[in-house]
Every structure is written in structure tokens, then in C-alpha cells.
Image: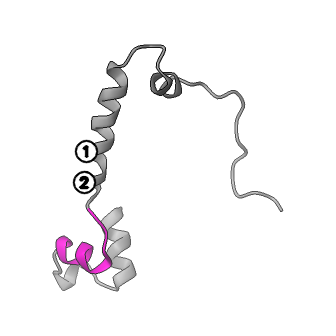
Amino acid sequence: MEMRTLRWSMGVTLKDKVPNEVVRSTVGVAPVTVKREPRLRWFGHVCRREDESVAKTALNLNVKGTRPHGRPKA
């Protein structure tokens, strides 16, 4: 989904045979894995913390209520 959107914004199709790295560097976007790995590393730290820590409390927080679907009605 990510690469499809980037290619669409550049006007490049798969038939043009432009590599993903070229598309990402042209648009200036990092690969998803570069963003995902630090988040997973932080998640591991939070999971190993004490149950009373602020980070673990926020991770296990349950919010009451629901948000309405769709865009806000103004």
C-alpha cells in the first residue's frame, strides 16, 4: 500500500520498472521497517518494566466510550 501511494504521487507505474529505493529516495521517505524497528524495541522495554511504571500503565490503559465514525459534522 505504501509503495503504491508513493508511485502514484510520482506518476510512476510498475511497468516503468523504477526500483522502490529510487522512488523512496526521490520522495524522501524512509522504508517502513526503519520506523518499525525502534518502535518494537521501545515496546520491548516497556513490556519489561514494572507494572506500576507510567509507560506500562499507559500501554494497558483502557479508554471508556467510543468515537463516532466518519468525519466530524461541523
Residue 67 horizontal side relative to residue 32, left or right: right
At a point 71% along the width and 58% down the height, the residue shown is 71
Q: Quadrant of residue 70?
A: bottom right
Residue 33 horizontal side relative to residue 65, left or right: left
Q: Which residue is mark 1?
A: 37
Front residue of this view, candidates 2 and 17? 2
Decide: few, some or many residues near mark 2? Use Cα within 10 Å; few <14, some 14-19, many ≥20: few
Question: How far across and how far down the image is residue 72, in percent?
Answer: 75, 57
At a point 48% along the width and 14% down the height, the residue shown is 52
Name the quadrant of the C terminus: bottom right
What predominant SS class does the magenta segment belong to? helix
Question: How far across and how far down the image is residue 54, in percent?
Answer: 50, 24
The residue range painted magenta reads 20-30
Question: How far across and how far down the image is residue 19, in percent?
Answer: 16, 75
Q: Is residue 49 above or below residue 65?
A: above
Q: Which residue is mark 2?
A: 34
Q: Is residue 16 above or below residue 63?
A: below
Front residue of this view, candidates 60 and 69? 60
Give the alpha-carbon distance from disc 2 to disc 1, as whole Å: 6 Å
Q: Is residue 67 above or below residue 63?
A: below
**Do tag 2 and tag 1 residues touch (Cβ < 8 Å)?**
yes
Q: Amino acid at mark 1?
A: Glu
Q: Amino acid at mark 2?
A: Val
SS for dot 1: helix
Check if residue 19 falls in the magenta segment. Answer: no
SS for dot 2: helix
Question: How far across and how far down the image is residue 8, in percent?
Answer: 37, 78
Q: Quadrant of residue 65?
A: top right
Front residue of this view, candidates 66 and 42? 42
